Amino acid sequence: MIRTAMVGLGKMGLSHLAIVRAHPDIDLVAGCDATAYLTDILNKHAGLKCYGDFDRMLESEQLDAIVVATPSKLHAPMVRKALDRGLHVFCEKPFVLDVADGEELVELARAKSLVTQVGYHYRFVGAFKEAARIVKSGALGTIHHVRAEAYGPVVLRPKGATWRSAKNEGGGALYDYACHAIDLVNFIVATPSAVDGVVRNSVFSRDVDDEIYGTLRFADGASGQLCVNWSDESFRKMSTKISVWGANGRLTADRQECQLFLREPHAALPGVGTGWTVRYTTDLSDQVWFYLRGEEYSAQIDYFAASVKAGRIDGVNSFASALDADRVVAMMLAEAGGPLVPAKTAARPGLLSRIFG
Amino acid sequence: MKPSTAPLAAHAMDRVLFGDNQFFGVNHMSEEKARSQSMRFQELGAIIDVLDAAYEEGIRTFMCTSHDRVSDICDHFRAHPEKYPDYRFYPCMPYAHKYANAVTEHGMIDALRMFLPQEGAIAAMLKGGVALANKDIEAIMQMLIDAEMKMFHGLNTPVVFMQNVITDLLLGLRMDECFRIFHDHVRARYGAEPGYITMNVPRLLDSLDALGIVNPIVCANINKIGFRMCGGIPAYEDAIARRRFRPIAMSVLASGAISPREAIAYVCGQPQIESIVFGASGRANIRQTNALIRELSATPHSGS
C-alpha cells in the first residue's frame, strides 16, 4: 500500500480525496487543510485523520506520497517540502506560477528519482488520447494550424471571494482554464515556441482575467490560436475543444468525441478511409475501478499509483511535462504586458435572487 | 432513534421511466447534439410536448434532476392535475453543476450558505448558523434536501434519488452515514422511498448493506458494453442476480453506442431489473423504445 496524504481539501481536493480513498493500492493516512471547518467535518464524519498544518503533517506521518490540491501559489513551497522528504508527488494544475520554481522542482525530483504528476486530466480522456494518437501518427500530414478552446460558466457577475479571483494566487481564467487548453496543445501537437497577439481581458472580475486569446507559434512554422473564456453561461460546464489542421485533413476532439476528416487514407491509420470518421467516448473510454465525475479523474490517480509502484519517473504529466504549460503561460503573461483591462460590464442580479427570487 | 428500515408499503415502480438529460443539454456522445437539444428545449412548451407524448405512450413517471428549469415543469403539472391524474415525479438531487459553479465562485462554506433556505421555520436556527457552526451534518443535509424538494411540493414524488455525483463522492469519502441520513429523511419527511444513483454498484451495495439499508432502489448504468459500470460487467451481472436491491437501468443504449433491440434485450434478459429509464426527444423514438421494452420484457431472453 502506498501511504499517502492529501493537502488542500477544497473542491478539487474533495474529489481527489474520494477517488484516492477508493483506490485499492493507496492508504490515505491523513488530510490537511487550513479550513478547520472542513477538517472537523471530515474527521468527524469520514473518519479521516486531519491536520491544519502542512509541516506538522509531514513531520508526524510516515508517508510515501502526497497529493497537493491547494491554491496554486502554494504548490511550489509545498511540493518542495514533500520532495525534500522523499515523497512522490501528485500536484493539481497549474504546476507552478513561477517557471524558475518549476525548473528547480523538476531537478529536485529527478535527483531523488521521485514520481511526479500534475493533474492535467484531459490527457486521460479517451477522445483526447485518440486525437494525440492520430496527430502523432502523421496521418494528417504536415500540421499547419491548431485551435484550442475552453469555455465555461465560472465567473458570471462582478463578484468573487475565493482565491480563484485573486491576483498573484494563480486565479483567473488563464491559470484555471487556459492552462488546460495549452497542455492539450502540448500533448496533441507540440509545445509552442512563442506567442503573440495575446489579449487578456476581464469581463466581470476586478483583479483577474476572464478571457484570454492569443496566437501560438511553433518551431516548424505552424500556428495556433487559443480562445478561452470562463464567463460564458451558454455552456453548462467547462467545455474544451481542440482542432488540428494538416495538409491531409483535420480533426476536432472534445471530451465526448473525436472527429477526423482525412483527404486521403494514410498508411499510419489502417482501415480509416477518406472523409469523416467519428469515434465516441463510449468507445474510447477505458473502464476505471471507481467513477466520479469522469473516467479521467480516476484514471490519472490510478496511473500515479502505478507509477509509484513501478518507479516510473517519466510518465504522463510529469512535472517536466506540466512545466511546459507553465512556460507558455509565462510567455502569454509577458506578451500581454500592461495591466489587465478592467471589467466594463454592468452588475447582474446576484445568485441568491436568481435561485430564490 | 433512527426510524426503522422496515419497508414502507413498497412503492411499485413502473417498468418504463422517462429521463430528463435531453432537456438540459446533457448528452454523453456529442456536445453539438447537447447544444441543439438545449436550444430545442429552451421553451417549456417543447418539453411539455415531449412529456405529453411519453404520457400518451403510457409513461407516467418522470425521473428528473432538481435543475432550476424543472420547477417550471412542476408548475405545469400542478396547474393541470386533471390531465395527469396518475403522474409521478422521481426527483434526483441535486443538479450538481449549480453547486459546483457556486463553490468555484464563492468558496465552499458561502456556497453552502446560499443553498440553504433563507426563510421559514429553519430561519431562526440558521440565522445563528447553528447547524453550520456545529457541523451538524444531519441538519445541514436535511435542509439541503428540503431546499431541493421545494419545487416538487404538491406533486406525487414516491421515490427521491440522490444523484450519482453526490452518491459516489460520499462513497469515496466514506461518509456512508449520509446515505442513512438521506434514507431516513426522505422516508420520514416525504413518505417516499429513497433511491441512489451510482456508477459504482457493487461498492455502493456493500456500503448500504453495512448500514442496514435493506432492498434499496439503486439506479445505475446497465448496458451491454459496460459503459460506466465500475467493477465491470460480470460484477454487475452477479450483483443483479444475487444481491437484494431494486435495480433501475439507465444508459441502456449507452448514448446510442448499441442498437436499441440488442441494448434492451440485454437488460430485459436480467429479470431482477425492475425498471428502465430512458430519455428521448421525439414521439417516434419514445414509441419505439417503449415498445421494445414492453416486447422484450414480455419474453425475457435468457440471462447471460
Image (tube, coloured by chain):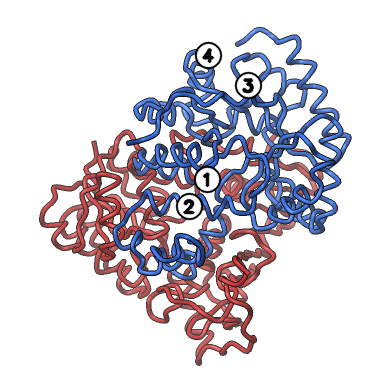
Chain colours: A red, B blue
Residues under numbered marks 3 and 4 in contact, where contact means CB atoms less than 8 Å apart: no
Q: Name the element at disc 1.
A: loop
Q: Chain of mark 1?
A: A
Residues at marks 1 and 2, CA–CA distance in whole angstroms: 10 Å
Residues at marks 3 and 2, CA–CA distance in whole angstroms: 36 Å
* Identity, as a three-letter code, of the amino acid under mark 2: His
Q: Position of residue B44 (x, y in %)?
A: 80, 55
Q: Nearer the viewer, mark 1 or mark 4?
A: 4
Q: Position of residue B271 (x, y in %)?
A: 63, 13
Residue furthest out toward the front: B121
- State which quarter of the image contains the C terminus of chain B: top right
Q: Position of residue B237 (x, y in %)?
A: 54, 18
Residues under numbered marks 3 and 2 in contact, where contact means CB atoms less than 8 Å apart: no
- State which quarter of the image contains the N terminus of chain B: top left
Residues at marks 4 and 2, CA–CA distance in whole angstroms: 35 Å
Tags 1 and 2 on a common chain: yes
What's the mark number on residue B241? Answer: 4
Query: Relative to B164, is B68 on the left or the right?
Result: right
Q: Earlier in the sequence, mark 1 or mark 2?
A: 2
* Residue under label 3: B274
* Residue under label 1: A294
* Residue under label 2: A121
Q: Chain of mark 3?
A: B
Residues under numbered marks 1 and 2 in contact, where contact means CB atoms less than 8 Å apart: yes
Residues at marks 1 and 4, CA–CA distance in whole angstroms: 27 Å
| Residue A74 appears in the rendering | yes
Q: Chain of mark 2?
A: A
Q: Earlier in the sequence, mark 3 or mark 4?
A: 4
